[in-house]
Amino acid sequence: MDEYNQTLVSHVHPPDWVNPKPASCYDLVVIGAGTAGLVVAAGAAGLGLGLKVALIEKHLMGGDCLNVGCVPSKCMIRSSRVVAEMREAKNYGVHVPEEIQVDFPAVMQRMRRIRASISPHDSAERFQQLGVDVFLGSGRFLSDNTIEVGSETLRFKKAVIATGARAARLSIEGMEEAGYLTNESVFSLTERPSCIALIGGGPLDCELAQAFRRLGSEVVLFHRSSHILNKEDADAAEVVQKVFIREGIRLVLGSEVKRVVKSSEGKTVYFTHQGQEESITVDEILVGVGRAPNVEGLNLDAVGVEYDQKQGVKVNDYLQTTNPRIYAAGDICMNWKFTHAADAAARIVIKNTLFSPFGLGRSKLSSLVMPWVTYTDPEVAHVGLYEWEAREKGIAVEAIAIPLSQVDRAIADGEEEGFVKILHRKGSDQILGATIVARHAGEMISEVTTAIVGKVGLSRLSGVIHPYPTQAEGIKKAADAYRRTLLTPNTKRFLGLLTKLS
Ligand SMILES: Cc1cc2nc3c(=O)[nH]c(=O)nc-3n(C[C@H](O)[C@H](O)[C@H](O)COP(=O)(O)OP(=O)(O)OC[C@H]3O[C@@H](n4cnc5c(N)ncnc54)[C@H](O)[C@@H]3O)c2cc1C
Ligand SMILES: NC(=O)c1ccc[n+]([C@@H]2O[C@H](COP(=O)([O-])OP(=O)(O)OC[C@H]3O[C@@H](n4cnc5c(N)ncnc54)[C@H](O)[C@@H]3O)[C@@H](O)[C@H]2O)c1
């Protein structure tokens, strides 16, 4: 609780907060003030229609993203990129001292400072000023139209469950006794672990494995599949994997952690790998094996809201639960567990709860085109279909891949590891998906997302002028490559004839 964390808490859970006197009935009561809940509440109250909106938060407003997710992880990643750039400086003709000193406590202090500086946006005070009644406490359904928070009962016309998810637990012998980190505790570290084991191998682990390694920890990453980021395009994962190995991350693929024993030496992780039992002793263990939805304590059974302990609250395409007056948005009910997905879902909920009389004009979750990015270095960004998904759906597709080693700016930047891969419908220029692996792939993917949303095909994209030299030219090169596939021998002959005649 340094000055930065005190500032953070003073915004997102002010210790002296007094809950307001509830209105007689709310148009909308939102449980959970993470991204989904905040966007629903701000959107509904900010319309200036005089709607009565209540927002209930039991812990920290801003939820995972601000407090223990996107924001702190991206701050750590930024510091770790500085180290990586310095280590590679000599490749660019710049000499830095051999021994780069990483001040881990200062890295974490920077993160806390930035997190605190962003927090006013999600603060109780800001939402109060927007006209939202903010209740700090745990929300629990009492009946079809009432929610209890502390000693108050809030009556509602519509309610939204936006209670998010938490780190899924691993039941491994000795883990609880030995103690381990999750995303809820890792950002509270103030000393660098000299050796850290990460169990999982999804985006959370991969981002933090690389950050810890670059900041100076020995890192062992346990993953049960044959390549990390197993949900991603295999070629993309392979690029990241090669970088990880080069940077000295020990990858233990196809492994299973069996038990953990704590001793005065540290935490010894026993695992099987290629049929052998092995062990390694580390200071800390970070578990990133997915999320468990926060369904407990909401009394969902009493209001007929169906849920399941893995998938969370069951919703239809309109984000309506099995109780038609109650909606849900964000990690509590969606496979897309991203801040921008929670934001997009929240907008759908505002429309469907408040502006769709008799269910007319409702928006659907399935109509969203959802990109996502894993912020390793290089980043892996994806939108639309993967090749395997297209195959499963029986859609004939073709992929065009441009390695970054063919993109001048990537060469100039010394960032040639990666590619732009665009998937289009066979026999058509319709873009169905894309994966980009590049240092700033997250910045590049929006162009493809815009093209998909705006129904801009590869032919038109090829005519869009991209400034030279930029890495985004890789996208144009992919579009140009598609255009060239249209040049059949006959069209070539015809064009040759035209040239002669002109
Ligand atoms: C380490 C990490 C890094 C991430 N990085 C990214 C990233 O770079 N980009 C990205 O897009 N996504 C990222 N994510 C995912 C992103 O954080 C989540 O998808 C997003 O926060 C989901 O928002 P939400 O509102 O659905 O849930 P949450 O943020 O979990 O918010 C739910 C809120 O509800 C509250 N709550 C729960 N139960 C109750 C109750 N009964 N009463 C009152 N309040 C309750 C909780 O305290 C919480 O504040 C990351 C996640 C992690 C863990
Ligand atoms: N950049 C981003 O957008 C970003 C970054 C970090 C996290 N997140 C979000 O946060 C959530 C959590 O991230 P995550 O990486 O923990 O989740 P994840 O579900 O994406 O990946 C979890 C990984 O753990 C592995 N795993 C699952 N159970 C296991 C077990 N019992 N033993 C060993 N391995 C196991 C899975 O194979 C998978 O690779 C995700 O939903 C993700 O969308 C997003």
Image (cartoon, grey):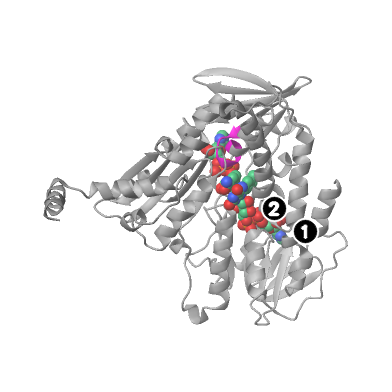
Query: Which residue is nearer to you in this view: 252 or 7?
Result: 7
Indicate the secondary structure of the residue bearing disc 1. helix
Q: Disc 2 to disc 1, how far (Cα)?
A: 10 Å
Instruction: Residue under label 1, please give it.
Output: 12
Label 2 lies in ligand 1 vicinity (Cβ under 8 Å): yes
Indicate the amino acid at tag 2. Answer: Leu
Horizontally, is 430 left or right of 67 in the view?
Answer: left
Quadrant of picture, ligand 2: top right
Residue 85: x %, y % from top left = 62, 33
Residue 147: x %, y % from top left = 71, 69
Residue 119: x %, y % from top left = 74, 57
What span is in magenta? 199-206
Query: Which residue is nearer to you in this view: 405 or 68?
Result: 405
Of the residues under marks 2 and 1, which one precedes in the sequence?
A: 1
Tag of residue 66: 2
The reply to whether the magenta stretch includes residue 335 is: no
Q: Which residue is drawn at 62% across and 28% down?
A: 94
Query: Which residue is nearer to you in this view: 198 or 147?
Result: 198
